[in-house]
Amino acid sequence: MMTSTPVNEELLKTSVRQLSVINRFGSDKDKEQPADPFPAIAMPAHNGLDGLIRPVVSGSDSCLAKTYHHEALAPYSFANAVQAFTKAGQLGIGAKLIASDAATESLFLEYLNQGWETAVVTDFKDPNRLAKLVEVKKAWHIKGSSKLDLSAFDVFDAYQSVWNALPNPLPMPVNTDITMEKLAAIVGEIQQAFKVSGSDLAILHGENTMSNVLISDKDDIKLVDFDRTTISDPMWDIAAMSLEVCTDDDDRNQLLEMYFGATTPALLARLKLYSVVDDAVWAMWALLGETNPYRKGPELYKYAANRLVRIRHHLSSSDLSKLIKEM
């Protein structure tokens, strides 16, 4: 007769696991009275949504302790995140990884709080700074590291499988006019088009909101969060960036020129199609987060609604079948 090991519900709580790892790696002061965690914010920034983050001292290093919420990384993995963070620190593209702990799914990262600030969208209205960001992304695409080869469509399918298994899934936001069936059909149609056209491969950053960029007082740039690095089509990263920094096709073509050296109608069509898929992926991620007791709370349902509204806008302003033909 098979038996299952009882789950310790306390250890599924992120705060319990983080305090456990701080007691092993943190300073005496952190053990006695750890600093307050950074607040989780979904909009307009995108911070602290996958885990609990707080400043600590480990040895002589000022660090950020990041402990992932239960199931927050799926279908990605903690091992992949450790490998990616390690490589990013070695390349100087991201903060250095000081320590990691698989048992609590925790990272201790270099705390870049002196001379560095979190970027906002308006920082990249300057085309020279935007070009610099594109170069950093491109450097990661070439030199980065990932154990995984998940496409945007693989991630969407993984999220949809979890959604379909929920006993009581949330209702879709009514202001979007998009059902789950319609969303899956849109993503499926785009996926078939990319299967026919083929895709390049690179090591993606996967975290493309501007709050995942740091700018120094010398105008240097580093990337934040390598939780979702994967080997996939680099256009996915570029399209996700475009959702942040582009308002029209002139902006999108400028971004494409910065990355590829030139733009074409086919490249623009691919960017627009991946933009829709990226919004679909993150909408699903947020909806699932709202059903997870360890992640729900910081406006995730509204965040999903905003992503779905943008899909509706893009589909109303662009003909999906025409974009597929153009690519």
Image (cartoon, rainbow, N blue to C red):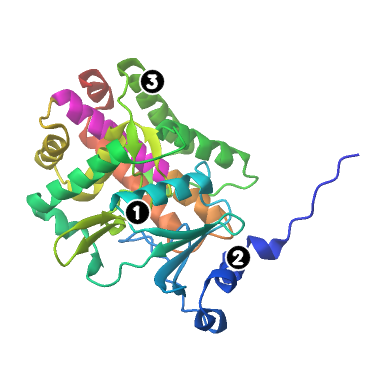
Q: Do the residues labelled 3 and 2 touch (CB within 8 Å)?
A: no
Instruction: Report the magenta residues as a range.
Output: 265-282
Marker disc for residue 192: 3
Residue 206 at x, y = what percent?
Answer: 36, 44
Mark 2 nearby-residue class (10 Å; few <14, some 14–19, many ≥20): many
The kind of residue tagged 2 is Arg
As helix, strand or loop, the secondary structure at mark 1 comes to helix
Residue denoted by label 1: 89
Marker disc for residue 25: none
Q: Residue at x 53, y 45 (%)?
A: 74
Residue 270 at x, y = what percent?
Answer: 25, 28
The kind of residue tagged 3 is Gln
Side of 141 where 153 appears, left or right: right
Q: Which residue lies furthest to the top in this view?
A: 196
In the image, residue 321 sits, relative to residue 22, either above or below, namely: above
As helix, strand or loop, the secondary structure at mark 3 comes to helix
The answer to which image quadrant residue 46 occupies is bottom left
Residue denoted by label 2: 17
| Pair 1/3: label in front | 1
In this view of the protein, can residue 140 be seen by the observer?
A: yes
The kind of residue tagged 1 is Gly
Mark 3 nearby-residue class (10 Å; few <14, some 14–19, many ≥20): few
Q: Which residue is drawn at 49% across and 63% down?
A: 297
Mark nearer the N terminus (2 vs 1): 2
As helix, strand or loop, the secondary structure at mark 2 comes to helix
Of the 4 image quadrants, the one containing the C terminus is top left
In this view of the protein, can residue 181 be seen by the observer?
A: no
Residue sitting nearer the eye, 322 or 199: 199
| Pair 3/2: label in front | 2
Residue 272 sits inside the magenta stretch: yes
Residue sitting nearer the eye, 318 or 126: 126
